[in-house]
Image: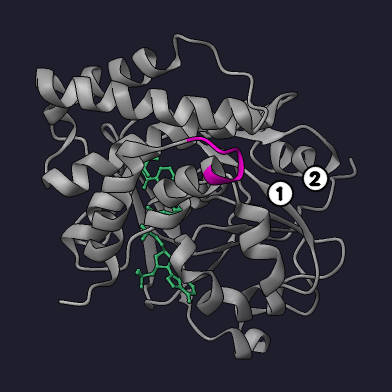
Amino acid sequence: MRTEPQPSIAVVGPGAIGTTVAAALHEVGRTPLLCGRTARSQLTLHDGDRLITVPGPVWTDPARTDRHGIDRPCDLVFLAVKATQVEAAAPWLAALSGPDTVVCVLQNGVEQLAQVAPHCPRGQFLPAVVWFPAQAQADGSVRLRGEARLSLPDGPAARVVAQALHGSRCAVDLAADFQALAWRKLLQNAVAGLMVLARRRAGMFGRDDIAALALAYLQEGLAVARAEGAALGDEVPQAILAWFQAAPADMGTSILTDREAGRPLEWDIRNGVVARRARAHGLSTPISDVLVPLLAAASDGPG
Ligand SMILES: NC(=O)C1=CN([C@@H]2O[C@H](COP(=O)(O)OP(=O)(O)OC[C@H]3O[C@@H](n4cnc5c(N)ncnc54)[C@H](OP(=O)(O)O)[C@@H]3O)[C@@H](O)[C@H]2O)C=CC1
Ligand SMILES: CC(C)(CO)C(=O)C(=O)O
């Protein structure tokens, strides 16, 4: 019997999201090359009671692809560094990508392509909506806190990703209206920024005053999303708030993890973007006008 050759796959940025995707691929026999910043011998994912170990190493030097067993571009690269880390990770994209390589950007926001493409001369770029929460633990392992699921804009590049993750614990939806999904997820991320300013986890959305603020901020974002052409219904703000209220009280968000670790924050792609896009449409954003400078200062200082 003839077996199909396996695609060559790399994960750049084996953190919370990168580890989840690497574990999903490994479980179905498509173990990716791991490319990171911190050397590790393996990755570990906790999904409920299940523990999945992805064999490493995590390579850390993009100039030494000869050591990694790569003699040609990969078929598929998952980029899962933070938006603030794309420039530093660009040498990995240059080392792993050829013109036919699909580069699937596992990042929040609605500007992934504009952010990443200038840093990589080759490849077919594909944004993804990453729906699931995952949290890095103190020992470097990752805890998955939801059903792993990605949405991608339907097309040939998305089908390469869907094929690679076929049969794995990470579901892939091919979306006809990706823009609406991306903006819906952006609104979820924008409101999660309130957790950074309060330094509290999802339980804080149980407060009436925070719920009212969150709804008003989500309404502000919804107007911008619609002006950008995203077809989102009136129910979206309440549905997003209800999602946070139903989440475990100790569920965080990746931007809060960065705040707690004193790292730069993705404030611009998650919150700043709402105000930036609003200006282009002549919309006012009184809530963003207060939140965004505070998030920017929390991220970048000075002081
Ligand atoms: N975590 C979540 O629940 C969700 C996150 N997202 C989005 O996914 C993206 C990734 O987030 P997340 O996984 O949480 O982030 P993490 O910080 O957990 O992971 C980022 C990884 O990239 C590595 N890295 C940093 N710089 C480089 C570099 N120059 N070269 C190679 N690797 C590098 C980091 O290494 P090191 O270990 O050294 O820091 C880390 O392993 C973000 O855009 C986030 O907004 C989307 C949905 C949910
Ligand atoms: C938790 C979740 C899914 C929503 O804010 C997320 O996207 C993140 O942590 O960055």
Count of marks overlaid on the render: 2
Above or below, comparing residue 155 to residue 26 in the picture: above
Mark 1 near mark 2, Cβ–Cβ under 8 Å? yes
At x 56%, y 44%, the residue is 277
Above or below, comparing residue 94 to residue 205 in the picture: below
Q: Position of residue 264 (x, y in %)?
A: 32, 67
Q: Position of residue 179 (x, y in %)?
A: 66, 32
Residue 20, labelled with which disc?
none
Q: Ligand 1 within 8 A of label 1's CB?
A: no
Assign a secondary structure to mark 2.
Answer: helix
**Magenta-colored stretch includes residue 159:** no
Residue under label 2, please give it: 157
Image quadrant of ligand 1 equals: bottom left
At x 42%, y 34%, the residue is 132
- Callout 2: few (<14), some (14-19), or many (20+) C-alpha neighbours within 10 Å? some
User: Picture quarter containing residue 93?
Assistant: bottom right
Residue 111 appearing in the image: yes
Q: Name the chief secondary structure element in magenta.
A: loop
User: Picture quarter containing residue 298?
Assistant: bottom left
Residue under label 1, please give it: 126
Q: Label 2 amino acid?
A: Ala
Q: Position of residue 300 (x, y in %)?
A: 29, 71
Q: Position of residue 188 (x, y in %)?
A: 39, 32
**Magenta-colored stretch includes residue 281:** yes
**Residue extent of the magenta highlight:** 279-283
Q: Nearer the viewer, residue 14 or 188?
A: 188
Q: CA distance from mark 1 to mark 2?
A: 7 Å
Q: Nearer the viewer, residue 259 or 66?
A: 259
Q: Label 1 amino acid?
A: Leu
Q: Is residue 244 left or right of residue 183?
A: left
Q: Ligand 1 within 8 A of label 2's CB?
A: no
Q: Nearer the viewer, residue 132 or 72?
A: 132
